[in-house]
Amino acid sequence: MIRQVNKGSHNQLKVVDIGINTHQEPVIYMREDCHICRSEGFTSSSRITVSSSTLSIVASLNVVDNHVLEQGYVGLSKVAMQRLKPDLNEMVTVGHADVVSSLTALRKKVFGNTLNYTELQAIITDISEHLYSDIEISSFLTVCAGGRLLPDEIIDLTKAMVNAGKSLRWPKYDQVLDKHCIGGIPGNRTTPLVVSIVSAAGHIMPKTSSRAITSPAGTADTMETLTEVNLDLSAIQRVVQETGACLCWGGAVNLSPADDLLIRIERALDLDGEGQLIASVLSKKIAAGSTHTIIDIPVGDTAKVRNRESAERLANLFTKVGAACGIHVRCIITDGSKPIGSGIGPVEEARDLLAIFKRQQDASQELRERALLLASHLLDLAENCGLASGLERATSILESGKAYEQFKRILSAQGGGKSLPSSRFQHVQPSSKSGTIVAIDNRKLARLAKLAGAPFTPVSGLRLHSNVGDSVTSQTPLFTLFSDSQGELEYAMSYYNDNTDIFSISGRLQ
């Protein structure tokens, strides 16, 4: 939170950019013999208010050896410098951070109690205003995971996350459509296809997407390899006015801002709790002004949702929370037993999209069919036309090239198209057995792509050459692994060599 500075304080030090990337958590660095540390009783991990001449932030303290900083100086991490915006050598004032009262509600949840809307709103507001440390955010996510949020708490959490940020409104339109996949299936990059098909059919679909949480790529990561995704609110409105749709990153426009802070910690924890998942998805839909949305819930042994019973429970929660928050939700339970597309990782998934749009013979038919299924549900939801009619129309739009033309209009409106880059290093991995692939471990396959560098290095990832049901020999390539560094490529292959059960093949060793 930006606050007015207490100019009467005398606890002042000169700023130095210490050049340390602490991601999104502001950190300050003070000498162990600093007179302010001693007089105020600061220790490592203390929460400190740092005030420049115009702005104020809350940061976590790291105490460093005396030789690291000159006497009279305080070091700021990169994100602390970005938020405080001080001049180098500017005098800043440091002091104790105010008590964050919502931590009382957090502790209440730790001990198994139910939180009301006021308490959840206080937590989300304080997280949005950067008053929580990463440890405290981790605690909140952990106590909300594992089914610990009741339906009413999920509803209140969703509303609190919407109210903490900005919202888009589309008063000219009675229906604003959206879609989301809860993830867990490598290569399931249907969103750009669905958005292009449905908006080419004349519907409004302002799609704001997240970056990857636990996967090798999110829709925003993939779209960023093709065009600009960091659009502000006015740019989103302009693009939608011009094309009827957009495909951008929601984190750039402060829609449900707490969600992006939570996602950052979820990624580090490799955690995606049920209640937080629902609140995260629906808060962004509501903040984007959506009135109707479909939710794709893939089910499989190594998917995020493992069985039909869990999928139906999740679908019921999505529908209930959506209705309570004023958005019409339809959940589609789909096959999550194997990877969908052939490309895994931002650039490789973009290649899959372009192959389908261009109607290439080597395009992934499973990804194409999944996108058409979801598009038909959206058309039915919007027009009550029936799934068969919706599927026929969606297929016609894709096969005629209208969807590709619409996709290119969206790319142009968002800043123009980009050429896809290539990785510097790659490795083709053949099968070790002859037989039939009977299963692929989605989680381990996704981890393999991440270890190669995805999504942080967009060219990194892998391309599947064989999927479940295919017959292979010892000469058949299973996949090509891509990386932008030799070290990451070797690191990923070391993981594969320790986990050759990623591909389950019926047959004898060669």
Image (cartoon, rainbow, N blue to C red):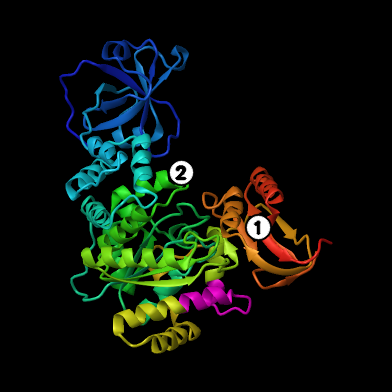
Which residue position is annotated with label 2?
A: 269
Asked if the magenta segment contains residue 370, the reply would be: yes
Q: Is mark 2 on a helix, strand or loop?
A: helix
Q: Look at the picture and state if 276 lies above or below 363.
A: above
Q: Residue at x 21, y 67 (%)?
A: 326
- Which mark, by number, is residue 502? 1
Q: Which of 248 and 293 is in front in this view?
A: 293
Q: Residues within 10 Å of mark 2 (few under 14, many from 20)?
A: some
Q: Look at the picture and state if 455 lies above or below 401.
A: above
Q: Look at the picture and state if 270 lies above or below 202.
A: above
Q: Which amino acid does label 2 sit on?
A: Leu
Mostly what secondary structure, the magenta segment? helix
Which quarter shows the N terminus? top left
Query: Is mark 2 in CB contact (under 8 Å) with mark 1?
Result: no
- The mark nearer the N terminus, 2 or 1, is 2
> Residue 207 location, x and y as percent?
35, 66
Q: Look at the picture and state if 199 lies above or below 303.
A: below
> Residue 239 location, x and y as percent?
32, 67
Q: Which amino acid does label 1 sit on?
A: Ile
State which region is magenta. 354-372
Which quarter shows the C terminus? bottom right
Q: How crowded is mark 1: few (under 14 residues within 10 Å), some or many (20 or more)?
A: some
Q: In which quarter of the image is residue 314?
A: bottom left
Is residue 388 shown left or right of residue 150? right
Is residue 33 shown left or right of residue 401? left
Asked if the magenta segment contains residue 371, the reply would be: yes
Q: Nearer the viewer, residue 7 or 215?
A: 215
Q: Which residue is drawn at 40% across and 13% down?
A: 32
> Residue 334 location, x and y as percent?
47, 72
How far apart are labels 2 and 1 at the CA level?
Answer: 22 Å
- Which mark, by number, is residue 250? none
